[in-house]
Amino acid sequence: MSLLVNIVEQAALVALGAGLCYWLLWWKGRNLKKVKTLEAEALVAKARADAEITSRDARLAANEEARKLREEADQALATRRAERLELERRLAERETLINSQLTRLVESEKTLNEQKEALRLRAIAIEGQQRELTELTRQGLEQVQKLAGLTQADARSEFLKRVEQDALQEAAKLSRLILEEAKTKAEEKARQIISVAIQRYAGEHTFENTTATIALQGDEIKGRIIGREGRNIRAFEAATGVTVLIDDTPGAVLLSGFDPVRREVARESMVRLIADGRIHPTRIEEIVAQVNEEMAETIVRLGEEAVLKAGLPPMHLEITKLLGRLHFRHSYSQNILDHSVEVAHLMGLMAAELGLEVAPAKRAGLLHDLGKALNHEVEGPHAVVGADLIKRYGESDAVVNGVASHHNDVPPIGPLGILVSAADAISASRPGARSENMTTYLKRVEDLEKIAGGFPGVEKSFAVQAGRELRVFVQPNQIGDEQAFVLARSIASKIENDLQYPGQIKVTVIRETRCVEVAK
């Protein structure tokens, strides 16, 4: 009995435990279901909020995109509208042009038709005149035959003979005119060729440009220079290639020669021989050979210094030598090498101002007078000779043409020829650059004053500033203010036509009016 009770009790306890476990499981499941429901509701709410945000962003993006598309469409529409308007305008212009061209074509066709009709009528008239001329000629021949008793063949022969005589007279007259014109042109060409030859062979002032004077301490040295039976002077002239003039100038020896380098070699050799005192043919040959070697080195050094002064890279050795030879040549007392360096600097400045390459401009300026270093060795103007020379040594075509055209011997291709001509004139005509002898200067001043005095109303005139300015005083009662300007222009024009001068001459007309009154 007690065992049964125990079993029942245990069974009851088991059932009670099982019930408690089931209840705990059911309660836990319900709470878990609530939690999952709450989480699901939170996830749904979050998803709904995210969906609303995404939807709002999408709507905003769609609205922005739509706005952009609408703006682009408006811009494209406006562009198309503007293009359409431009096309319509062009079409209207083209239509107007076509209409005007059609009108002109119609007018031209009408004019051509009128001209064609006029030409046709003219041709008909000419044919009628030709028929009348033929008939008149026939009648004239018949009358001539009747009057002269000649046949048609004889009359034709007589007519042809007269025509031949008239033709011969006209031909003789024409040939005489052609010969006279050819003679005039030949004389002008000859004068030009002679002028070029004089310029190439020697300068305007022969004494200044072709001689060198060496002062002597006493006249007894002249005998030693001449030598026994003139052997010393002959040896010196043979070695140097210059002429020695001793008796013409007292107390001095005069060396004459057209080559300035030989003249300088002769001058230096003579100075050394006089200082040495041993003057005989062997010593003369030794001194001249030594001076020639030193002169060759000096010429190269002078050429290199000129290139360096111009700010240019080293040039060909032959060009450098010719530049050095220019140191011994002068034009109106202006050293040509210094003049060339000055022209090179001016060319560089002007080229820089004009936006051109400076280096070729400087090369053209430095080499523009290189042909003068050849003297009379090569025929032709020095500009063309120098251009041909530098072309052989690799100078560019622009530099070659700039050198060749700076005296208008050949037409300029680029701006360098014109710039070289301007720089050459600037360097040569600036005050103090060149000088002229006293006779030429006085003659030019006298001619200036004479030209001004030849105009009516001029009271007096004065050439000032070394002949570079002409001041003209006029009578105020004859020349007014307006007439003063005309007078200045007239005087300047007459000076340009009648005189040869370097640079420019300024004409100043002064009209002075004095009003005097006496107070009593």
Image: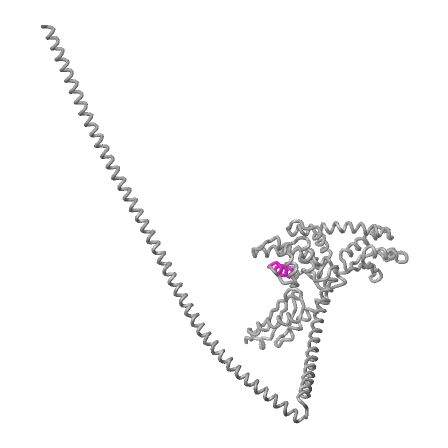
In this image, 79 relative to 484: left or right?
left
Q: How many marks?
A: 0
The quadrant of the image that shows the C terminus is bottom right
Magenta stretch: includes residue 7: no
In this image, 19 relative to 259: left or right?
left
Residue 437: x and y, percent?
Answer: 72, 64
- Would you place residue 118 above or below residue 273 in this image? below
Which residue lies most toward the bottom here? Answer: 147
Residue 114: x and y, percent?
Answer: 47, 78
Residue 431: x and y, percent?
Answer: 65, 61
Q: Which residues are the magenta region?
A: 415-425
- Residue situated in front as seen by the camera: 364 or 45: 45
Task: Tell me what residue is drawn at x 39 percent, y 65 percent.
Answer: 92
In this image, 161 relative to 474: left or right?
right
Instruction: Indicate the colouring scheme.
Output: one colour
- Would you place residue 363 above or below residue 503 in this image? above
Magenta stretch: includes residue 423: yes
- Residue situated in front as seen by the camera: 311 or 245: 311
Residue 374: x and y, percent?
Answer: 73, 58
